[in-house]
Amino acid sequence: MAESYRAEDFEPLHVDQATQTLSRPSLSYWQDAWVRLKANRRALFSLYIVLALLAFTLFGPMLWTVDPASQDLDQVSQPPWADRSATLVAPYEPWQGEPAEPGSGLHAAQTPNTQAVRLVWEPMGNAEGGYRIYRNVFAIGPEKAYGLPLGEQFDAALTYFEDRLDLKSASYYYTVVPLNRYGDELEGAVTREIAVRNAITISHAEKRGLLTEGHTAQVGDSITLAAHPLGTDYLGRDMLARLMYGARVSLFIGIVAPFLYVILGVAWGATAGFLGGRMDGLMMRFADFVVALPFLLFMILFKIMFGIGPGESGIMPMLIAMVILSWPATSRLVRGQILQIREEGYIGASRLLGAKTNYLVLRHMIPNTMGVILVTLTFAVPSAIFTEAFLSFIGMGVAPPTPSWGSMCNEGIKTMLTTPHELIFPAVFISITVLAFNLLGDGLRDALDARMRSRE
Amino acid sequence: MWRYTAKRLFQGIVTVWFIATATFIAMHLVPGDPLASDKAVSPEIRANLEAKYGLDKSGIEQYFIYLGNLAQGDFGISFVQKNRLVNDIIREHFPVSATLGLLAVVFAGLGGVLWGALTALYRNRLPDVIIMFLVILGISVPSFVVAAISQLGLVNLNTLLGVTLLPVGGWGSVAHMLVPSLVLGLSTMAYLTRLMRSSMLEIVNSDFVRTAKAKGLPPTRIFTKHQLRNAVLPVITVLGPAIAAITTGGFVVELVFAIPGLGRYFVQAVQQLDYTVIMGTTVFYGAFLVFMVIAVDIIYGLVDPRVRLN
Amino acid sequence: MPEVATDEPGFAKSAGKQLLTFAAIAVLGLGALMFVLDALASLVGSDSGSSSAIEPELNMVTIAFEDEPPQLDSTQRADQISGRVLGHVMEGLLAYDEHSQLIPGVAERWEIDALDATFWLRKDARWSDGEPVTAHDFVFAWRKAADPAEASEYAFMMHYLKNGEAVSNGDMPLDALGVQALDDHTLKVELARPTAFFDKLVAFQTFYPIREDFFRSTNGRYSADAHELLYNGRFKITSWVHGASMMMVKNEHYWNRDAVKLDAIKVGYITQDTHARFNFFKDGKIAYTGLGAEQLSSAMENNFHIRRFQDGSLFYLEFNHQPHRVTRSWHLRRAMQLVTDSGELVNRVIKLPGYLAGKSLFPVYLPGVKETFRREYGEPLQELDRVRALEHLELAKKELGVKEIPTITMLIGDTPISKTQAEYFQAVYKETLGLDVKIDAQIFKQRLEKMTNKDFDIVMAGWGPDYNDPLTFGDLFASWNRNNHGDWKNDEYDALVDIAQNSMDQTERMEAFARMQQILYDEVVLLPHYERGQSYVTHPQLKGLVRRVVGADPDLRYARIEADAS
C-alpha cells in the first residue's frame, strides 16, 4: 500500500488558543496563601479586627477630638452610664462656720451639693475635746461603723464642718461623734442622712466649654456635663481618648518592636546561614549568649539603664531593650531555614545555570523564608504587647502622662471593685488585640504551610 | 556522651560569664547613685560608704574583683539590707520561687496534656468548645489581671463560706501555693493545650495509627500507646523554655499573693538600686536557666533514642 | 481531610476512660508532690495561714508589714519599718506613752541644763539575756553612731553633742564625743550648744543603747537575724524569716513587764500591695491595715471601723533657686503659688480622708508653747487668684527677659501617688498659666541623685520629722543644710534658725518659727501640697493601737485584746 504524503501534512499544526489556556489560573505562592487565608473564617475575622484596631488608633483621634490630657475634675472616675446632669452654682467661697439654731440638730447649713457640704450641729454636753465627723454611703447599722472619718473639730465650741472630699451625687449619712480630751470617742453620736446633688460652678462650666461665650445661664440652672462614652479615669480624663492614645503606645511597641527585631534576626541569621563555617559558629554562639539572658530581668535592667529623661515617654528605651533581647530566636529560625534551602535541589540547579549569589538570595532564599518570618512576626506582636503591659504594671513602663493600655490597667486594677470600667476597657483592648494577632498567626501559618498546599 | 556533657558544661560556664559581664556593664551604666539616701550625708561619710562597697575603685578593678568573688560563689553584701549577704537572700528566697515555679510547670504540663487530649477527642463538640474558649482567655488576658481577680475571688469565696478554704496569700503550706501556681501556670497551660490538641489531630491521621487500626489493635491501646505517647513529644520539647518563662515571670504573682520569692526581691532591689542584689539575682537566674536547659537536653537525649548527642 | 479516627463509635468513650485513668494518676502524683512541697515550704515559710488576726487564747495579734526591715541596727536605722520594729523591741533613755507624752524609759530621772545633761538609769532595766542595761551601753552606741567608719545616715544626730560634728567627720577620736558613763547607772552628756528639745531627742532611735560585748560577738552580723540582736524593750524577736514573717514575743526581762498586755505580735505577711493587705484583713488574717482610696467603699460596705491619722510627713514642691534656672524668678513662683490649690489636690485627686491640704512648712501636730504651733500662730492665708497670677507671669517674663517661659522640668519619684499628682499639676499649670511642665519620673535613688545635683526646676519632695519640734522642719531651708536642694539662701531665715537652735526660751523660738513660716510663704520657697494622712482599719477586738508621728508607728506596745467585739 502506497501511502501518499501531501505537502500540507508537513505544515506545523495550528496553535490553538485552547491548548495554551490553563484550566485554572496560575497562582503565585502569595496568591495561593491569600486564597487559603480567605477561606479561614477565623483568621479573616482576626484580620478585620487588626485593621479595625489600626483604624481606631490612627483615625479615632480625628473623630473623637477630646484631649486625653484634659482633666474634668467634676467627673472623676465616672462610669459610662453616670448621670451627667448638674446644677450651676456660684464660685466656691471659704466658709467660716455658723452656729446651729436650737432644736435643729445636725443638718446642712446650705443646700448640699458636690462642691461642698456644710454641716452645723448643736453643742454636745460631753464633748470636752471636740467632735469627729464621719461620712458613710450606707446606713449606720448596729456595728456603729460610721464610715469615713472626715475630720475633727478639736474645740467643743466649734460646731460646724465643711466636707469637700470627693463628693458624688448620692445620699450620705453624716455622723458627729463627741470626743474626750484625749480624742477618744464618746457616746452620743448623731447621724443625719443628707442628699447631695451634682453641681458645677459657673467658672468651671465656662472652662470646660459647657457654656458658650455671652451665655445667660444663672446660678440654679440645670446643665449637662461633658459626655464621656467610656467614662472617665481617676483624674476625670476621657477614657475613650486615653484608650486611643494608649493604643498608639501599645500597638507601636507591639508592632514596631517585633518588626525591628525580626529584621535584625533575619539579617543576622541569614548572614550566618549563608556564610556557614566558622563565622556561622561564632555568630550563632553570640546569639546563644543573648538568648541565655533572663528576659524580664534584663528588660527591667535595660529600662533603668537607658533611663527616661524629663518629658520623655519611655517608649524608646523599652523598644531598644526589647530589640536587643529578642532577636536571637528569629535569627536561629532563619538560619535553620537558609541551611535547609541551601541544600535543596533547585538551588543547586539554579547555581549550575549560573545564578549569582545576589539572585539566589533575593529570588529563592528570602521568598522561601518569608512565610516563616511573617508567622514569627505575627506571634511576636502579642508577646510584645504583654511585655509592655507587664512592665507598666510593675511601674517600669511608660512615664506619665503618656497613657498605654498596660499603665491604664495598672491604674484600673486598684479601683477594680468600685469603678471596674477603668480596668475592664484597657484589659479588653489588650485581650482582643492579643487574641486577634494569635488567631491571625494561626491562619497565616496554615495558609503559608507548604505541606498544606499539597494536601488539597 | 561524657564528652558531650563536658562540652556543654564548658559552654554553660562561658555563657554564665557572658551574663555576668553583661549584668555588670548594664549595672554600671545605670544612672543614679546607689548610696544616695533621704537625708543628705557629709562627704566624709560618703567616702567611707564608697570604700565599704568598693565603689572607690576603677571600673576595671571592680569588674575583676566582682569576677573573682563570683568564681568563689560570693555575691557580696546588700546595699539596702546592710548586713545581709546576697547569698543568704538567694538561699532563703529562691527555693520559694522554685517551688512555685515547679508546681506551675507541673500544672501547666499535666493540664495542657490532659485538656489537649480531651479537646482532640471531643473535637468540635461541647467539651472542646468550652475548653478552647477558656484556653483563648488564658492566652489573651494579662497575668496580673488574672492574679488580682483570682485573689479577689478567693476572698469572696472565703467570706461566703465563713471559713478560710484557701489562704489569700502568704507562704508556708501547700494551701498557699495552689492558687498562685495555677495563676502562674495558666498561660503556659493554655499554650500547651493548643499544642497538644493540634499534635493529637495530626497524629490521628498518621500512617502508624492507620496501620495499628488495620492490625485490629484495641482502640484503648491505639490511643495510649500510639496517639498519646507520640503527641506528647512536642509538648515536652517546649517545656524547657516554658520553665524559663515561668520561673522568671513570677514577680507579679509573688507581689499580689505576698509570697517571699526572689522575683519580688529583684523588683525591689531595682527600685532601690541595690547593685549587689541586682547583679547577684540576675547572674544566679541566668546560670540556673543555662544549666537547666543543658540538663533538659541531656536527659532528653537519654530518653529519646532518635536524638543522638554529639 | 480524612475523618479522624476519634469519630468511630466507642473509640471516644474508651479513650475517654483511658484519659480519666491518666488524670486520676496525675492527680495522685500531684498530691504526692504537694505533700513533699508542703514539707519543704514549712522550712522557708511563715505558716501565715494558720493564725487569725486575733488569737485571744495565745494573747497574740497578727499584722502585716509593707516591707521587711532592711536591718535592725539602731544606729544605722533610716527607714520607717525598722523604726517600727526597733520601737517595739528597744527602749531609749526616754520614751513616749500612749498619748505621745514623754515618759521615763531606761532613765529614771534626768536633768537637762544649757550645756549638759545627766541621766540616772533605773537599776532594774535588763537586756533580754538578763544582764543589766548600763550607761556604758549608751556610750558605746552613741559613739558607734558618730563613728565615721560606720557611715551612719543619722550621724548628724550626734552633732548636738559636744565635739559631735568633729568626731563624725573623723577630725577627733571617738572618745572625744561628749558622752560618758560616770558609773554603771549615771550617764553624763555634754552638749554642743543649748538644746531646748534634748529630752525629745534622746527618745529618738539613734540614741538607743547597744551592748558592746554582744555587738563584738556577732562578727559584723549584728541585727542580721533574730538571735543576732539583743533586746531591752517590751518585746523581743524570736523568729525572723526574711521577706515572710517575724515573731515578737513579750520580753520577760523588761523592767515594766507587767504593763505589757500582749504576749505576742506576729508579722504574718510582708507585701507592698495595699490591695493584698486589705484582702488579708477582710479574710480575718490581720488585725490592722492601711487603706488606699480604692478600698474605702469596700471597707464601708463591710462595716469596718475606719480611722484616720496624720503621719507627720509633709509633701511639697521645692523650687530650684540657682541663677540659671527660670524658677529663680520670684514672679514666676508667685504666679504658680496663686494657682496651686492644695485643697483641690487633696479633695479631688488624692481623695483619702486623713490627708490635710498643705498650708505651711510646719504640720499641724507640732508643739508650740502650750498648744500646737499652728493653733497658736496660724498659717499664711492661702490665696487663689488666676488674674493676679497672669500678671505675675507677665512680670516674670520681663524679669527673665524671655518672650515665653521655657518648659519647666518637674522631678518626681515613681510611686503611683506622685505620678498622679504630677499629671494633675502638669494640667493645672498648663490650663491656668499656659506653662509647659515636663515630668521627670525617676526611681528613688535616681531622683535623689538628681536632687543632690540640683538637676531640676521644681521637685516634688517630702520630709518626715525626726523629733517632735518644729525645728526638724525649720532647719531644712537653712542655707547650710544639705537637704536644701534648691540652694535657697536668706540671711534673715538663717538668723531665725540660729535662734531656734540655740534659744532655751520657747516663746522666742516659736515666734522665730512663725516668722520663718511667713518668709517661706512670701518668698515662695516651697508650695506645700499636703500633710500625709492614713486611713486604716483595725480589728474590733484590738484596743490601744497607737499611731504616732515620731517613733514606732503603728505602735502595739500598749495594745490589748478585748474579750469580745464592742
Image (tube, rainbow, N blue to C red):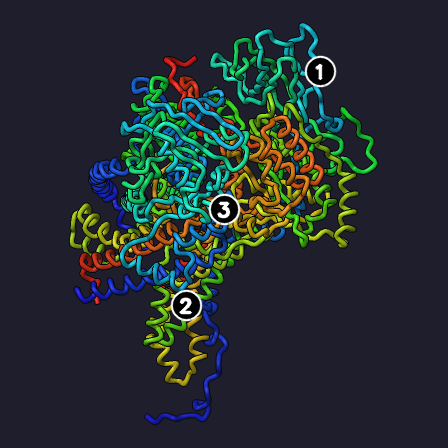
Describe the element under mark 1 as helix, strand or loop.
loop
Q: What number is the disc on residue A276?
A: none
- The amino acid pointed to by label 1 is Glu
Do tag 3 and tag 1 residues touch (Cβ < 8 Å)? no
Disc 1: CA contacts within 10 A as few (<14), some (14-19) or many (>=20): some
The residue beneath circle 2 is A369
Whether residue B118 is visible: no
- Horizontal side of B161 relative to C35 (left or right) equals right
Of circles 2 and 3, the one toward us is 3
Disc 2: CA contacts within 10 A as few (<14), some (14-19) or many (>=20): some
Residue found at x 66% / y 34%: C517
Describe the element under mark 3 as helix, strand or loop.
loop
Q: What number is the disc on residue B41?
A: 3
The residue beneath circle 1 is A98
Residue found at x 48% / y 24%: C299
How far is the residue under mark 2 from the one under mark 3? 60 Å
